[in-house]
Image (cartoon, helix red, strand yellow):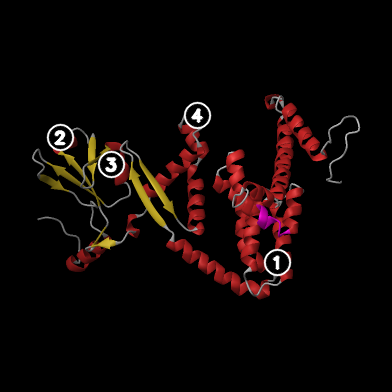
């Protein structure tokens, strides 16, 4: 179809077919927005969401194609690039506008990605992932032009089956699919670098909210994260907890949080490192009055953090826990032990010493 303006023989003004087509799209959208999806059947919602997703991808393809040739806008406005005009006229943040311009320029280098966008198969997010992977591959001196084309084809094909995040993982390993014999060693080195980088970026921090909760923030390697996620999902037990909540369905993120707490509560303290010859120990401090009141509350550790009797009993099930009973002047009346009976090594020592059963007197 020609992109040149056509003459409207029924009037005096020239008519641009592209303007007419955009106006038709806008008109169609206006009509669609008057429809209420509440009355659509479930099958219709699924089908129409798929159609809308495809149309959105095609719209992104058109926008990127226009942005790739928008250098004249910068020349006319005197800006470094078209992002200045987008900021002023379209109210698009400059960082977002420059990101879109950069993507438009990169996508234009890869014909299969451009075609995938136009067909509605490759979304804008996936196009960004694919082009980043291809740009990284192109810097490898061992990669030929044929390797690059094959990698592009494989990634575009995968785009119809994977999410953008999944495609990013595949993109880092795509050379092994292009030619396993040549790039197997390179993939192994890339995996090693990735794991080392993950180790360097690993951290854990916590913040006490002052309302009985603590926010946790952590970053771990993908392997550790996936293992943790699998463990938490297996412990979440939504059916069981739904029964406990009298049929009320709890949010899944809450179930995962409770599962995480369960992992901490049931951790085997025998696996903890030993300090000064004994295992890591939790002290539960209570007053004699609290003890007489059936341990209404207790203090955890040495900073006086209060916990309930129920929480203390729960901790006592699986921890090196020493109860400390204090008098009215905070003097220690009784210092408990982590175990009531002798440890196995003590049993063996007693048998070696006494040779038979022993009792007082």
Q: Who's the residue at 41% across and 49% down the image?
A: 217
Span highlighted in magenta in the image: 104-110
How far apart marks 1 and 4 lie (CA) works out to 54 Å
Q: Would you place residue 142 above or below residue 67 in this image?
A: below
Q: Residue 148 got which mark? A: 1
| Comes first in the chain, label 3 or label 1 | 1
How far apart marks 3 and 4 lie (CA) works out to 28 Å
Q: Choose mark 1 or mark 4, whichever is in front.
A: 1
Which one is in front, 231 or 306?
306
How far apart marks 1 and 2 lie (CA) works out to 77 Å
Q: What element carries label 3?
A: helix
How far apart marks 3 and 2 lie (CA) works out to 16 Å
| Comes first in the chain, label 3 or label 2 | 2
Q: Position of residue 339 (x, y in %)?
A: 24, 52
How far apart marks 3 and 1 lie (CA) works out to 61 Å
Q: Which residue is the site of mark 3?
A: 312
Determine if residue 163 is in view: no
Question: Looking at the rendering, which quadrant does residue 13 occupy?
Answer: top right
Q: Which residue is the site of mark 2?
A: 289
Q: Residue furthest right?
A: 9
Q: Which residue is the site of mark 4?
A: 248
């Amino acid at each position: 179809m020609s992109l040149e303006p056509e003459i409207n023989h029924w009037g005096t003004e020239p008519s641009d077919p592209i303007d007419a087509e955009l106006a038709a799209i806008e008109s169609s959208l206006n009509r669609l927005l008057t429809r209420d999806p509440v009355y659509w059947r479930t099958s219709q919602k699924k089908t129409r969401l798929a159609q809308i997703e495809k149309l959105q991808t095609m719209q992104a393809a058109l926008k990127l194609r226009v942005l790739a040739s928008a250098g004249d806008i910068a020349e006319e406005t005197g800006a470094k690039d078209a992002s200045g005009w987008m900021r002023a006229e379209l109210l698009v943040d400059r960082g977002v506008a420059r990101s879109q311009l950069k993507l438009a320029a990169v996508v234009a280098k890869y014909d299969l990605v451009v075609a995938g966008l136009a067909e509605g198969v490759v979304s804008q997010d996936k196009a960004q992932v694919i082009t980043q992977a291809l740009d990284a591959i192109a810097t490898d001196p061992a990669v030929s032009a044929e390797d690059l084309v094959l990698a592009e084809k494989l990634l575009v094909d995968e785009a119809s089956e994977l999410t953008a995040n999944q495609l990013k993982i595949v993109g880092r390993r795509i050379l092994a699919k292009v030619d396993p014999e040549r790039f197997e060693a390179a993939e192994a080195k890339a995996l090693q670098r990735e794991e080392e980088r993950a180790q360097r970026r690993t951290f854990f921090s916590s913040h006490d909210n002052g309302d009985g909760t603590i926010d946790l923030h952590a970053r771990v390697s993908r392997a550790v994260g996936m293992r943790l996620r699998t463990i938490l999902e297996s412990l979440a037990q939504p059916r069981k907890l739904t029964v406990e909540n009298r049929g009320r369905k709890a949010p899944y993120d809450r179930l995962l949080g409770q599962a995480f707490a369960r992992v901490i509560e049931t951790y085997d303290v025998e696996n903890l490192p030993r300090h000064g010859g004994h295992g890591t120990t939790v002290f539960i401090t209570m007053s004699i009055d609290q003890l007489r009141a059936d341990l209404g509350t207790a203090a955890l550790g040495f900073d006086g953090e209060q916990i309930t009797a129920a929480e203390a009993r729960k901790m006592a099930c699986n921890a090196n826990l020493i109860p400390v009973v204090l008098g009215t002047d905070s003097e220690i009346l009784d210092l408990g032990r982590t175990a009531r009976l002798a440890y196995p090594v003590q049993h063996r020592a007693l048998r070696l010493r006494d040779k038979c059963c022993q009792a007082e007197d």
